[in-house]
Amino acid sequence: MTLALTAAAPDFGGLDTPLLVVALAAGAPLPDELGPVDTALGGALRRALVRRDFRGARDETLHLAGGERGVERVLLTGLGPAAGDQPGALRRAGAIAARAAARLGVPRLAFYAGAVDAAAVEAAGLGLAAGAWDFKELKTPPPADEQRAPLEQATILAADQRARDAGVRAAAAISEGHSLARRLGMLPGNVCTPDYLADTARDIAKRLGMQVTTLDRAAMQREKMGSFLCVAQGTTQEPRLIVLEYRRGPKDGRPIALVGKGLCFDSGGISIKPAQGMEWMKFDMCGAAGVLGAMEAIGRLELPVNVVGLIGATTNMPSGEAVKPGDVVQASNGKYIEIINTDAEGRLVLADVLAFAKRLSPIAAIDAATLTGACVIALGHTATGVMGNDDALVQEVLDAGKRSGEPGWPLPLWEDYKELIKSDVADIKNSGGRPAGTITAAMFLREFAEGYPWVHLDVAGTAYTESDLATVPRGPTGVPVGTFVEFVRGRAH
């Protein structure tokens, strides 16, 4: 369930809430308008700041109990240095506050951060929604006396009516996209199959006025998508190429293409992965989840632009029919590929999807994929790897990622790297080995993203987390929904 976000003018004399969250920068005094709340608490708020029990550091919190009515609890939440990135700090503070509220078992809260503009309201709303998100649909509920009420509603208090209304509307739309992407990522591979992703696309299309087309195995065979299909050889599940079209821009306007890798489970195929940690490979469809989440948000925002979401969905399994190292397959653009490693399968799926995208004449295309472990080694779990065939587009995507709180870092696509994926028997091979693994994977994709500006996002380190972070628990993070949406919003405006 997505958090219900609302906005209201601050009225601290008459505020009635189980929890008031106050976000303060490091060293900031108590805002004068909170005087009635402080009085009701016997001056506890001001004393906490004077005594430096609370200093406003990033991620710092201080919980104070209030009365039986009015403001029942106060949670001070730190923003860090005042000169920092305000939207980013508010996103983080909102998420931490919502997680704390869930632990307390309060069903609703009010959030106050002083004078804020629409971008700040949006950031706070996105943080609150991210922190409130929880995945319980496959768990048996605990006994009634052990259950805590979920956080269901958050009201952002801001004096500027236009700012608060615009910010909350945008946050509500984008948080729905984040929640959808995270839910899809959390579902196990036996539930979130290629058909499930296709059904999700149909549901989005039906609700938000889009068009959807899916190609099955037979249709892809007619399209000669040998690169995509070789990955699907080892599974009995039908592979799906999903095309979700949102047309709210000029009738003859070229669309933005958002492309996602949808490996609903990746065993590695014949080049099988180690057993330890293989269960995390249900997250190999986070690129596809990001596309669907972005399309959900874009539809709710009603942006005046043309966008097409493209998803290549299958599973990578070993069997007597599975593709083998040394095999050669032909992609739909005619290029022959030598299979060096069947665990380098995402690029094989995306090759035919990117070639398919050319027929749409996209004005720009961005793909997202949990593509390489090498990207995690290079950038850790903080930044997404960003590469492309158009420097201006790469910078535009980097800027969108920064605005959305999903930072990226550029890596080079120099021609010298292409030597690493030259094949003795085919036009190209699907793996260049360990050196520059993230770059050679993108170099491979570049061979199929011909005729249009293209950027590749390697989200292997950022789409999910194997440890509990301050803002999100273990599991999917929602990346790259924010980057996709911010890029499209930038083009729409």
Image (cartoon, helix red, strand yellow):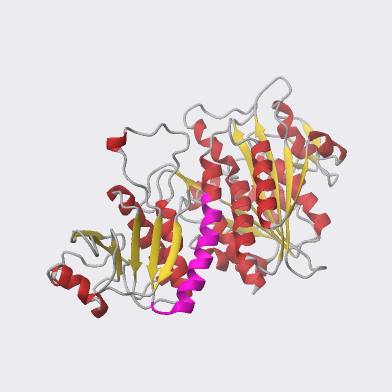
The answer to whether residue 49 of the structure is visible from this angle is no
Q: Quadrant of residue 189?
A: top right
The residue most toward the top is: 320
The answer to whether residue 65 of the structure is visible from this angle is yes
Q: 410 or 332, which lies in front?
A: 332
Image: 423 above or below 58: above
Q: 240 or 336, which lies in front?
A: 240
Q: Is residue 167 magenta?
A: yes
The residue positioned 74% from the left and 68% from the top of the image is 249
The image shows residue 84 at horizontal and vertical percentages of 37, 72
Q: 112 or 85, which lies in front?
A: 112
Residue 373 relative to residue 331: left or right: left
The image shows residue 56 at horizontal and vertical percentages of 26, 67
Region in magenta:
159-179
The image shows residue 408 at horizontal and vertical percentages of 53, 60
Magenta span: predominant SS is helix
Residue 292 relative to residue 209: left or right: left
The image shows residue 59 at horizontal and vertical percentages of 31, 59
Image: 264 above or below 381: above
